[in-house]
Image: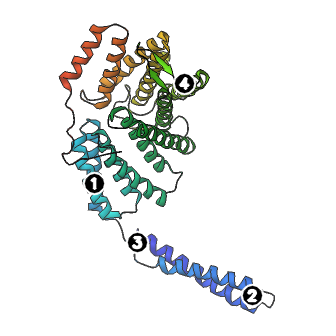
Amino acid sequence: MRSLAVATARRLQLRHQRLTVRQFSAEQRTDSSATEDAKRRQSEAKLEARFLTANKPIDLPDPQKEKALQQLQVRLQELHKAGNARAALQVAEEMHQETEKHLGAQHPATASARSNIGLQLKLLGRWNDSRKQYEQALKIYRATVGHDHASTASVHHNWGTLLRTQLHLDDSLSATDRLSVLEMSLEHLEKAYKIRLAELGAEHPHTVASRSGWGASLASQILQNYKQTTKGLYRSMVPEEVTTNGWDAAEEHLRQAYVTALTNPRGRGLQNPKTRAKTKRQKPTQPQQLNTIQTLSAASAGQNLALVLKARAAVLGDHERLNEARDLYRQVLQVREKLLPADHPDLYATKFSLAELLQAQGDEEAANAIRQEIVDTYDPPENDENDNSTT
């Protein structure tokens, strides 16, 4: 590494010498204007500054610190996959402290560490604390890698997902706050999808996730326009044409994301349970697998689609969509049961939604059986006693 730096410095020195000769020759020219001479001197000054900088000693990364950070990263991934958000948060906070000491506050790795903290805080229901971490991570990424980088998109996605989750789970939100949270969720997920589409391509699992999340938030926006009557029916507060177009747009995003995930299986799946999302596309071994969920990426897209189909069926009385949602939930459940721990939050989300749908269809026995599975394994996270998070 140091020999490369010396060679580079030598090349710059020779280049500097050649430029000096050029400068002398240029000064002998009688036809050079004052403006051209000024520009030339300015350019040569910049090159000289680069040369001097190149000759400074290079600070090599501390291998021990690098190894320690890698170990923390592996531990964090293990705890996150196991659904242990409380332990994962402690590791994420330690990793952020060590990363900042090693690389500085304004570094992409530090932004990633902050984003990891935000994710665990979201899983623990600490909405405001999570938002603050994402806000800081976004500022760092924008300053270091730019507004349109895939890493910047990851924060937009995580922030938008946080807000969408808060919308469903935070009962303390006022009607005005709910609208504000929803608008921000849509804004972040739309940005994430467009950046990832340009940087990663339509088939990448991250692009699929952002498009699916954006579609789900669009559906949530439509649901805000409905009001339940005394007879238990739902009535739209805006013209029917507006709601229909809105439903169609949301469902289109969700269906396209789901189909993309099915036909381009990537990431952890039934064929490769230990594979990460960076791997190349998997080819389904059998034709029928093109119509069945095989990966966690497709499972997430299917979950979002089923959720919106169920909601649309509820307000419109559409039994066909309700049956489709039920079948999707069952497929998602089969994959998540095989690939995720028994107490993973995503697995609980699928079981809860399926039980709710089965009850709506009158199958109380099946619904109660799933609810009992949840009760038998669920250990809810305990928030910090000092956590006073607000929107």
Q: Nearer the viewer, residue 330 or 3?
A: 330
- Look at mark 2 in the image and give the residue it sits on: 34
Residue assigned mark 3? 2
Question: Residue 249: which numbered mark, if any?
Answer: none
Q: What count of labels does the image hold?
A: 4
Q: Are marks 1 and 2 in contact (CB under 8 Å)?
A: no
Q: The residue under label 1 is which amino acid type?
A: Met
Q: Is residue 143 left or right of residue 378?
A: right
Q: Nearer the viewer, mark 3 or mark 4?
A: 4
As measured in the structure, the alpha-carbon distance from the residue carrying label 1 to the one carrying label 2 is: 56 Å
Identity, as a three-letter code, of the amino acid under mark 2: Ala
Describe the element under mark 4 as helix, strand or loop.
helix
Pointer 4 with pointer 1, Cβ within 8 A: no
Between circles 1 and 3, the one closer to the viewer is 1
Q: Are marks 1 and 3 in contact (CB under 8 Å)?
A: no
Q: Looking at this view, is 136 or 172 the one in front?
A: 172
Q: Earlier in the sequence, mark 2 or mark 4?
A: 2
Please give the name of the residue rendered at 21% of the width and 17% of the height, measured from the top-left corner: 372
> Horizontal and vertical percent for residue 12?
55, 77
Q: Gap between marks 2 and 3, in whole Å?
A: 41 Å
Q: Earlier in the sequence, mark 1 or mark 2?
A: 2
Residue 211's spot in the image, x, y percent?
A: 51, 34
Task: Write down the residue under mark 4.
Answer: 247
Residue position for label 1: 95
* Mark 3 → mark 4, Cα distance in angstroms: 60 Å
Q: Earlier in the sequence, mark 2 or mark 3?
A: 3
Give the answer, above or below, for where 308 lies relative to 62.
Answer: above
**363 versus 53 height, above or below:** above
Q: Disc 2 versus disc 4: distance between alpha carbons? A: 66 Å
